[in-house]
Amino acid sequence: MNMGERLRELRLKRNVSQEEVARHIGITRSAYSHYEINNRQPIYETLIKLAAYFDVSLDYIIGGNAPSQSMHIIDLPDATDSKEILMLLRGMNHEQRKQSLSLLHEMMRQDNPARGRR
């Protein structure tokens, strides 16, 4: 199964329109439509958003065999928080991610000085 077929299959399983997927990941419906018919390939950032939206791995979207949880965080006690943090980080530019990670490391060092060291 090629990537376009996989995207269509995932979308239909979720029972959503191309417009809804496109709006959620921040592209036009037309661009998304081209992905499903294999006229275009999504950029890396868009692939990440698609994997998060459909809750599958990047490997599965690009042609892997088994659907799986994209980040294997579902089993963690705070899975909702972890997913929210990942989604927020994905929406940031490089500098924002860098600043956010620095802040998190600083918070960890304050909480437990030995734990926050790299």
Image: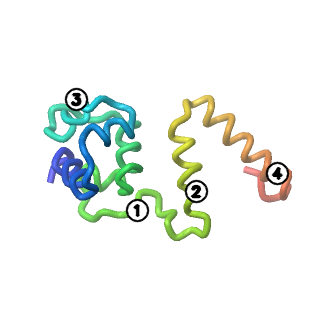
Tag 1 and tag 3, C-beta contact below 8 Å: no
- Estimate the x, y position of residue 80 in percent, counting from the top left: 56, 59
The residue located at (16%, 49%) in the rendering is 5
Crowding at dot 3, Cα within 10 Å, few <14 / some 14-19 / many 20+, comes out as few
Between disc 4 and disc 3, the foreground one is 3
Dot 3 lies on which element?
helix
Which residue does the numbered mark 4 point to in the structure image? Answer: 109
Between disc 3 and disc 2, the foreground one is 3
Between disc 4 and disc 1, the foreground one is 1
Could you tell me how far apart the alpha carbons at marks 4 and 2 are, in whole angstroms?
A: 20 Å
Dot 4 lies on which element?
helix
- Estimate the x, y position of residue 67 in percent, counting from the top left: 30, 63
Q: Amino acid at mark 1?
A: Gln
Q: Amino acid at mark 4?
A: Arg
Question: Residue 70, relative to residue 104: is it above or below?
Answer: below
Along the line of sight, which residue is nearer the eye, 17 or 94? 17
Could you tell me how far apart the alpha carbons at marks 2 and 1 are, in whole angstroms?
A: 13 Å
Residue 47 numbered tag? none
Could you tell which of marks 4 and 1 lies nearer the N-terminus? 1
The residue located at (27%, 49%) in the rendering is 16
Which residue does the numbered mark 3 point to in the structure image? Answer: 30
Residue 69 numbered tag? 1
Q: Amino acid at mark 3?
A: Ser
Could you tell me how far apart the alpha carbons at marks 1 and 3 are, in whole angstroms?
A: 27 Å
